[in-house]
Image (spheres, helix red, strand yellow):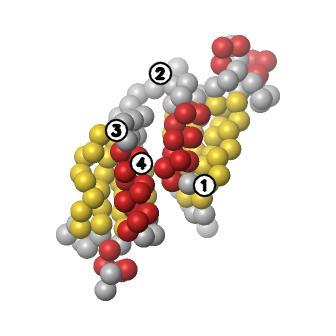
Amino acid sequence: MTQINAYLTFNGNCREAMTFYRDCLGGALSLQTIGDSPLADKMPKEMKDCILHGSLTRYALVLLGSDMVGEQGLIEGNAVSLMLDCSSEQEIRDCYEKLAAGGRVIHPLEISFWGALFGDLTDKYGNQWLLHYNWNQHNK
C-alpha cells in the first residue's frame, strides 16, 4: 500500500520539536544523530549532535524529521500542513491544546459545515496543523 508521511526539516532543534510532538501525540520516538552515523567524519564537529533522521510512530501515524537543511537554508512557509485525523473527541481536544501551546491558533475547534470537529493552528516551530474528528460518524 502506498502511504505518504510528513517529513519536517528543522534548523538545529529537531530533537526538541520531535520530543514536543511525541509529548503531544504519543508514540515511539527514534532519533539518530549525525555523530552516530556514517556521516560523522564528513560533517563539521559542531553538527555531531544534530539529528540526521528522526521518526515518531503511533499506529498509522508516521512523522519524520531532520536537522539536515539544504544550502538554501530553512524557509518557513505555508505550503505544507500536517493533517491529524483523530479517533475521539477527547483525542482531538488534547492534541489541539498541546500543539497550540506556544504557537498560534488559526481556527479554534468547532463543528464544521461538513459535520466534523475541526480546527487549525501553527505550532511553536512554525508548522501548520489541521485537526479533524468525524463528529457525525461518532455522534449519531
Residue 98's label in the rendered image is: 4
User: What residue is shown at x 32% (from left), y 74% (from top)?
Assistant: 135
The percent position of residue 65, horizontal first and vertical second, equals 57, 39
Residue at mark 2 to residue at mark 4: CA–CA distance: 31 Å
In the rendering, which numbered label is found on residue 72? 2
Q: Does label 1 or label 4 sit earlier along the sequence?
A: 1
Identify the mark nearer the N-term, 2 or 4.
Answer: 2
In the figure, 112 relative to 105: above or below? below
Which sits earlier in the primary sequence, circle 3 or circle 1? Answer: 1
Task: Tell whether 111 sits left or right of 54.
Answer: left
Q: Secondary structure at mark 3?
A: loop
Q: Residues within 10 Å of mark 4 (few under 14, many from 20)?
A: some
Residue type at numbered disc 3: Gly
In the rendered image, residue 30, in percent from the top left (x then y), is placed at 68, 44
Q: Within 10 Å of the Cα at label 1, are there few (<14), some (14-19), or many (20+) other Cα atoms?
A: some
Q: Are marks 1 and 4 in contact (CB under 8 Å)?
A: no
